[in-house]
Amino acid sequence: MSYKISVVIPVYNVENYVSQCLDSIVNQTLGIENIEVIIVNDQTQDNSMDIINEYASRYPSFKIITNDVNKGLGESRNAGLENVTTDYVTFLDSDDFISLNTLEDSLSKINESGADLLIYNIKTYTGNEFIEEESVHNQNFTENLLVDDINNYPNLFFSTSACNKVYHRSLFPLIRFSKGLYEDNVVTCNVLLSAKNIYLSKDSDYFYRKNPESITKKISKDNIFYLCNVISDLFELKNKNVDLLGLNFINDVLFWTYYYDWPMDDEISFIERLQSSVKIIEEKNIDAFIQLFPQKIVYREDILSLSKFDSKTFLAKFKYFNRMNKVNSTASLYIDLGNGFNEKNKISLEYMPKENNKLTFDLSDFSKIRALRFDPLEGDFIKSKINNLNISDANCDNSIDDDYQLFSNLDPNYILNCEMGDELTIDFDLIFLNKQDIANLLINKNNIINESNQKPKKGRFNFLK
């Protein structure tokens, strides 16, 4: 039988999701009789293949390949591609699914435009609703567009998923995925650079399942080492726009190193591996990246300094002795329901502290609220002010009537004086105190204490102070 397009689906331990994936294929408007479905059994340990065999018994276009050992996602895709008999292929992960018009719409646009690569939208699926997360790798299209020079669209190099794309046979020789994690980044960049015409489609969707058990959500040493390999390979492509993608991954490695509490030997090995993977980064490259993605936090000074210090000095300077927060922190809203403020009745939100911040807390689960206490940050000396609400008290070192409240304690908090509805948005400014600010605060505090202590008094061990 002659098929119009092939879909390669690697399978490993997805018994809870694979039916939704396959339903999105067999119900395509193109017709399942026109679709070659290549299932690659990567030695799945659950009942996934029992489910798949049911589909295969009903649909002759299903073809099942079984790896002799577990090979991982990349090599399983390679095995599937070797069995493709059509002129077009797309990849679908077995816990994801696509909109029912995807294959018909894509082939129609390809035939009309002569494109050898088509990219369509990615949306994130949470299990209950569809959401589009803000991400440099999730850039969806609002209009249909034929691109004949990708270098005029540098943001496309950040569309690194092997899925959400339809490839012409002329590109098949470039599609060879590596072992391990992040297997699709270099392949995708090679394909993007080699495609003669790329069609960007707004009219169909790939639904990526946001699965907290996914291996890409569990950051380990392997994540960092594999991503460093990708960074090195990207720089070998010698394209200024691909270099920006490498810069993004350098930033990711630094974030993981800063955010997690690793053993020191591991942190040293991360920085050493990163330093060996990175080519020279110029300031203009970082400027270009920030211009593309102005909302992303970029460790500018850190990246520019990677080659200037040995790994231990770099960690000391940029992880341990740089006071500016580089990772998500927590703000908490404590709710007094009549028993005072306690850990049971509080809402905590993670956020990346900036000079101005807006956080919205959902209070719909609380009734008869007596008072609210807002802790903007824990673990740093700060000055802060709330812009949109009145405050009745704060544990600051100066007056609550000053423009900013100064906090030389590591648990700054405000008592709010505001109306309470189902939600509360707090607009607040926050600045980290530098060493001189802290020194001045402590000197002033000591002067006040000394002036008030006219007589010596006993300390905790009965020694005279």
Image: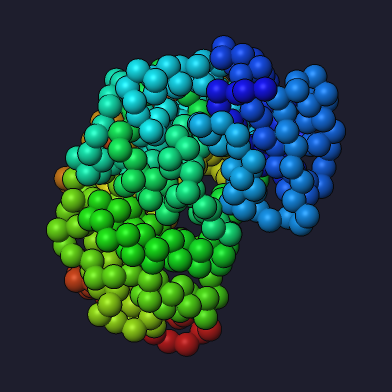
Residue 410 in sight in this render: no
The residue nearer to you, when weighing 350 against 51, is 51
Q: In which quarter of the image is the N terminus?
A: top right
The residue nearer to you, when weighing 458 against 188, is 188
Give the residue displayed 53% in from the left and 53% down from the top: 177
Give the residue displayed 45% in from the left and 50% down from the top: 174
Residue most toward the bottom? 463
| Residue 58 locus on image (x, y percent) | 80, 19
Residue 39 in sight in this render: yes
Location of residue 1 with respect to 79 vertically, above or below:
above
The residue nearer to you, when weighing 437 against 197, is 197
| Residue 213 locus on image (x, y percent) | 65, 45
Q: In which quarter of the image is the C terminus?
A: bottom left
For this view, does 79 lie left or right of residue 296?
right
Count of numbered labels shown in the rendering? 0
| Residue 383 locus on image (x, y percent) | 25, 54
Location of residue 434 with respect to 342 vertically, above or below:
below
For this view, does 234 lie left or right of residue 27?
left
The residue nearer to you, when weighing 226 against 334, is 226
Q: How is the image coloured?
A: rainbow
| Residue 30 locus on image (x, y percent) | 56, 14
For this view, does 98 lie left or right of residue 196?
right
Q: In which quarter of the image is residue 291?
A: top left
Give the residue displayed 39% in from the left and 23% down from the top: 110
Give the residue displayed 47% in from the left and 49% down from the top: 173
